[in-house]
Image (tube, rainbow, N blue to C red):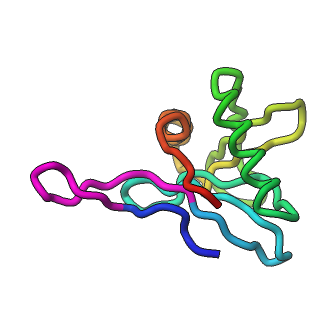
Amino acid sequence: MSPVASDESRAPDGTPERHARYDVHLDAEQHVRWRLIAPNGRVLARSARGHVTAGACRIELDRLRRRVADLVPVIGRATGAPGWFWSVALEPSAPVALSARTYERLESCQVSYERFVRLLTVTEPDDW
């Protein structure tokens, strides 16, 4: 599967204007997953679980976006890797989104989560 939205559009003066976007792809087990790509091109967040269909993946992402005010991050030390990570769940013990990488500093991890929430609320997924 290919990216769902362009990373650039044009501002009124004609200069490139970068935006966050969602990418939908198949993982190694052939499950559908989403990723949130920041304007700088880096993966900021990813789905915590794979889905059998793109429709099921989209339903979970839409639900996450609707309930952004209910999100409570879990920020902790990564197991088996150095650094900090964040995750969010809509139901107890069922994460739906994860940081795309670990962070050396706790503060960087917290900033990453805040950026995720901000971009989650303003980035519209295209039709899948």
Residue reaching furthest top? Answer: 69
Q: Locate the N terminus and report the quarter of the image it occupies.
A: bottom right
Query: Vertical placement of 53 versus 48: above or below?
Result: below
The image quadrant where one finds the C terminus is bottom right
Which residue appears farthest toward the left when viewing the image? 13
Judge from the rendering whether residue 25 lies leftward or rightward of residue 42; answer left or right.
right
- Image mark count: 0
Q: Is residue 39 magenta?
A: no
First to last magenta residue range? 8-22
Give the residue at x 77% y 52%.
48
Q: Point out residue 43 in the picture as x, y percentages from the top left corner.
A: 53, 59
Q: What percent of the width, then of the height, locates residue 51?
A: 84, 60
Indicate the quadrant where residue 126 lies. Answer: bottom right
In the visual, does 83 lie left or right of 32?
left
* Closer to the camera in the image, 103 or 11: 11
Residue that appears at 53% across and 34% down: 121
* 103 or 51: nearer the viewer: 51
The location of residue 33, given as percent across then percent down, is: 73, 62
- Tell me what residue is drawn at x 58 percent, y 74 percent: 2
The percent coordinates of residue 84 (x first, y second) are 63, 46
Q: Is residue 18 magenta?
A: yes
Kindly identify the residue that appears in the image at 38 percent across and 54 percent down.
39
| Left or right: 16 as drawn, with respect to 106 | left
56 or 69: which is nearer to us?
Answer: 56
